[in-house]
Image (cartoon, rainbow, N blue to C red):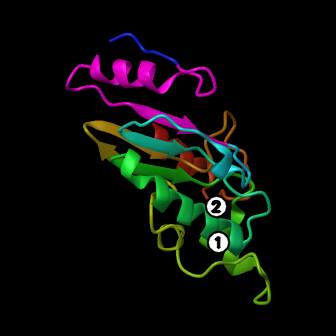
Amino acid sequence: AAMKWFRSDTLKQSEFSASMAERASGDVRFVCISDTHGHHRDLSLPNGDVLLHAGDFTRYGSVEEVQDFDRWLGEISASFKAILVVGGNHDLCMDATYRRNKSKSSTFAPTGSGSAVLTNATFLQNEAVIIKGIKVFQESCATADGAQICGLCTTTRQELRETWS
């Protein structure tokens, strides 16, 4: 099936509704966003089957930012069958290893795992989910040379080779 791209600022709701009706019954519509840096409430998103936020949903990684993002996900959850979230370099507080290494007095350390903090989404960290036969995998360390990125990588180069080979 041909992929259609839409810009939310130019698409009329009636046009989008018509395009949704044209989909084949087995199609899965992903709505992909990233780098919202706390401005998620400013977005006007089309409906879809899966919302994928590909990281940097916070600006500073504070507990308050994460909680607000999670509340917003709850508010928009009726528009999607599934919501997937991965952390970015601004979202280090979602990484358990990072939180363990932070000072106990840090305001940037929510308790629990990333999936416990985001109750209105599936938080992926070095794991996969299958939605309607489509496998979505998040790998914190996926770089060309296996170098660490964003401070989230605790995987060795050898472990990366074994995972992706």
Q: Which residue appears at 42% of the width and 54% of the height? A: 77
The residue wearing badge 2 is 154
* Left or right: 54, with 25 as reference point: right
Give whichever of 127, 74 is nearer the camera: 74
Three-letter amino acid code of the residue under disc 2: Thr
Q: Does the segment drawn in magenta span residue 31?
A: yes
Residue 98 to residue 18: above or below: below
Give whichever of 149, 122 is nearer the camera: 122
- Tell whether label 1 touches label 2 (CB within 8 Å): yes
Q: Which residues are magenta?
A: 6-34
Q: Does the segment drawn in magenta span residue 30?
A: yes
* Residue 110 quadrant: bottom right
* Residue 97 quadrant: bottom right
Helix, strand or loop for disc 2? loop
Q: Which residue appears at 46% of the width and 61% of the height? A: 74
> Which quadrant holds the N terminus?
top left
| Mark identifier at residue 97 | 1
| Mark identifier at residue 159 | none
Q: Horizontal and vertical percent for residue 65?
A: 70, 66
* Left or right: 55, with 48 as reference point: right
